[in-house]
């Protein structure tokens, strides 16, 4: 009986490759379903005619000592977000991006953000946002920070918002 030696050697190699591929898929599947590694999600808050949703802060980038916070506010009545504060930063300001002769710039909105009845105020990168200036320490993804919002009506809402990586900001 004549035995083909290369075929005998190829079979264990092929079985090893198949086993490692299956093990790799199982490991990847286990990683994506492990909820301990899933980013924190902001649960909508409803209080006193306000609904706050999709709040998050951007994780620190490099050595920068500033960051931004974003979210959506829906009110049943007309109101204005006039101030924000957080224990993680020296200063917290309400900002907007504006086109200044073809150059996009950020600037503080000193009179706050108008909230029209039953229309969402959306704060997002490149638009209205909450600027966290002079961070006491780097903001790390998958952790959270406190954020307090003060409205012209006298309402104050205290939130705990997740920090997300810049890669996740638009998702």
Image (spheres, rainbow, N blue to C red):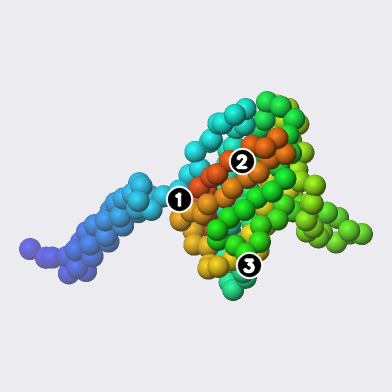
Q: Tag on residue 39?
A: 1
Q: Residue furthest left?
A: 1
Residue 88 in which image quadrant: bottom right
Relative to 50, residue 104 above or below: below
Residue 167 can be seen in this image: no
Real-space CA distance between mark 1 and mark 2, rounded to the nearest whole angstrom: 27 Å
- Residue positioned 19% across, 63% down in the render: 12
> Which secondary structure, mark 2?
strand
Dot 2 alpha-carbon crowd within 10 angstroms: few under 14, some 14 to 19, many 20 or more:
some
- Residue positioned 75% across, 43% down in the render: 113
Quarter of the image with the N terminus is: bottom left
Q: Tag on residue 134?
A: 3
Q: Nearer the viewer, residue 100 or 107?
A: 107
Q: Nearer the viewer, residue 43 or 170?
A: 43
Q: Of the residues under marks 1 and 2, which one precedes in the sequence?
A: 1
> Which secondary structure, mark 1?
loop
**Marks 3 and 1: which is nearer the front?**
3
Q: Nearer the viewer, residue 9 or 134?
A: 134
Real-space CA distance between mark 3 and mark 2, rounded to the nearest whole angstrom: 23 Å
Real-space CA distance between mark 3 and mark 1, rounded to the nearest whole angstrom: 25 Å
Q: Which residue is mark 2?
A: 156
Question: Where in the figure is residue 125, as x and y percent of width and height?
Answer: 68, 52
> Which secondary structure, mark 3?
strand
Q: Nearer the viewer, residue 16 or 38?
A: 38
Residue 90 can be seen in this image: yes
Q: Is residue 86 left or right of residue 105?
A: left
Label 3 close to label 2 by CB (< 8 Å): no
**Marks 3 and 2: which is nearer the front?**
2
Q: Is residue 31 left or right of residue 163?
A: left
């Amino acid at each position: 009986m004549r035995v083909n030696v290369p075929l005998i050697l190829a079979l264990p190699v092929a079985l090893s490759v198949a086993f490692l591929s299956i093990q790799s898929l199982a490991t990847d599947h286990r990683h994506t379903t492990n909820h301990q590694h899933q980013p924190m999600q902001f649960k909508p808050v409803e209080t006193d005619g306000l609904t706050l949703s999709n709040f998050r802060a951007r994780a620190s980038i490099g050595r920068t000592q500033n960051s931004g916070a974003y979210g959506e506010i829906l009110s049943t009545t007309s109101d204005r977000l006039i101030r924000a504060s957080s224990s993680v930063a020296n200063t917290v300001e309400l900002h907007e991006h504006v086109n200044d002769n073809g150059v996009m710039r950020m600037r503080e909105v000193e009179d706050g953000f108008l909230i029209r009845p039953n229309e969402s105020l959306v704060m997002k990168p490149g638009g209205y946002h909450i600027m966290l200036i002079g961070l006491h320490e780097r903001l790390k993804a998958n952790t959270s920070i406190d954020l307090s919002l003060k409205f012209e009506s006298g309402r104050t809402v205290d939130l705990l918002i997740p920090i997300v990586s810049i890669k996740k900001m638009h998702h």
